[in-house]
Image: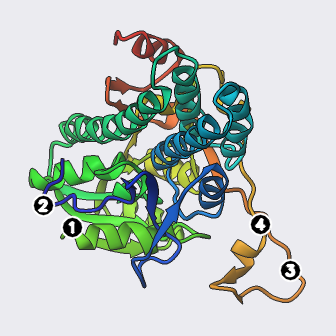
Amino acid sequence: MMSQHDTIRAVQWKDNHLVLLDQRKLPQAELYVELYGADDTAEAIRNMVVRGAPAIGITAAYGLLMAARKCYKQYPNDWRSRLIAEKNVLAESRPTAINLHWALERMMRAAHEEVADPIALLSALADRIHKEDIEANYEMGKLGSALIKVPHGIITHCNTGSLATGGYGTALGVIRSAFTQGKVTQVYADETRPWWQGSRLTAWELQRDKIPVQLLCEGAAAHLMQSGKVSWAIVGSDRIAANGDVANKIGTYSLAVNARYHGVKFMVVAPTSTIDMKTATGAAIPIEERAQDEVLSVNNHRIAAPNVQAWNPAFDVTPAKLVDVLVTEKGVILRPDAEKLAALMQGVI
C-alpha cells in the first residue's frame, strides 16, 4: 500500500532478518542496517537508528521474532523461558514509547500459544503488526484530513511520517492525505532540536514526496501563528495517558500552548497502541533523559562554551486540555478526557 505521496519504508523484513534505514545518516546518505537478533535490534532502537513510537514497536516485534527463532533452535524444550531475557533486552531499549511494550507483550502472548509451529505463528504476527500499522495510518489520514476544512498552512513537530511508522505516518499521514485533497498550502516543520528530526527527517521526507515544506526554529512557531500562516498544528505521540495527556517529542508542549493562545487548532494523531490505559495521567509517564552531549554538540563538534552542562529531556507532556482533537484509527475524539478515552478503548465513541 503505497502512493505518489508515500514512497518510503524505513522498516523492512527481508530474507528472515530485519533491515532498517539508518535515520542517523539522513539526509546526507541513505544507508541501511541489517539486524539478526534481539541485542543488535535493541542497540539500534537505543542509538536512534530507528525512532518514532510505531516504528520502534514494529522493530521490537521483529527483534523478538529473531530471538524466538534462536531460542527455539537452541533450547527446543525450554525456549519460552529463555525468551524472557531477550524480551527484557528489547523492553529496556527506550522507556517512554508505549508501543514498544505493547508489541512485545502481544508477541509474548502468542509465544505461549500451543501450536505445531510457534515460529511461523510469531512470524505471521510480526508481519501483521507491521501491516496493521500502515492500514491504521491510512485510516487516521482519512479521518484527520476530514477535519481540515479550508486550504491553509500546517505546522508540525518532530517526525511522524513513514520514517517513524510502518509507513505513511500518523501526523504526516494526515498531512499527506490533506495535501492530496488540496487542503495544504504549506507545511512548516520545526527543526526539533537536539536530534533535528524536523530538519533531517521531516523536511527530507516531505520534499521527497513533493509536499511543500519550510523549516523553522521552534522559537519561531509563535510568530508564525501570530502571522496567520497556519490554522492547524498537527503532531504525533509516543504515549497517551488514560486522561488524554500526551507525551511527545520535547517542544510539543510549548507548541500546544502557543497554538491555544493564537487560536490555532491542535491535533494529536496516534494509533490506539499508543494509548496507555494503565497510566492515569501524564505525570506518571516516564520521561527519557538522554546524554548532555546531544545538546552541547552538533555532529560531534561542540557548540557550547567549555564546561557548560545541559539538561536533555527527550519528551514532554502536553495536558489533555490543550488538545483540540485526538485522531486514532478507531475514531476521532474532540477535547479528549478520561471518559472519552475509556469509551474509545471499549470500541464505543
**N-term-proximal mark, 4 vs 3:** 4
Residue at 46% x, 49% y is: 55
Q: Label 1 belongs to which residue?
A: 209
Residue depth check, mark 4 versus mark 3: number of the one nearer the observer:
4
Residue at 32% x, 53% y is: 172
How packed mark 2 is, by other alpha carbons closer than 10 Å (few <14, some 14-19, many 20 or more), is: few
Q: Name the element at disc 3.
A: loop
Q: Label 2 belongs to which residue?
A: 4
List x then y, in percent, for residue 316: 64, 48
Q: What's the colour scheme?
A: rainbow
Residue 291 has which mark?
4
Q: Amino acid at mark 3?
A: Val
The mark tally for this picture is 4
State how far apart marks 4 and 2 are (Cα).
38 Å
**N-term-proximal mark, 3 vs 2:** 2
Q: Nearer the viewer, residue 111 or 137?
A: 111
Q: Label 3 belongs to which residue?
A: 308
List x then y, in percent, for residue 4: 12, 60
Residue 328, quarter of the rendered image: top left
Q: On the picture, is 327 further left or further right than 248?
A: left
Q: Nearer the viewer, residue 129 or 199?
A: 129
Q: Nearer the viewer, residue 330 or 260?
A: 330
- In the rendered image, is residue 16 in sight? yes
Residue 317, quarter of the rendered image: top right
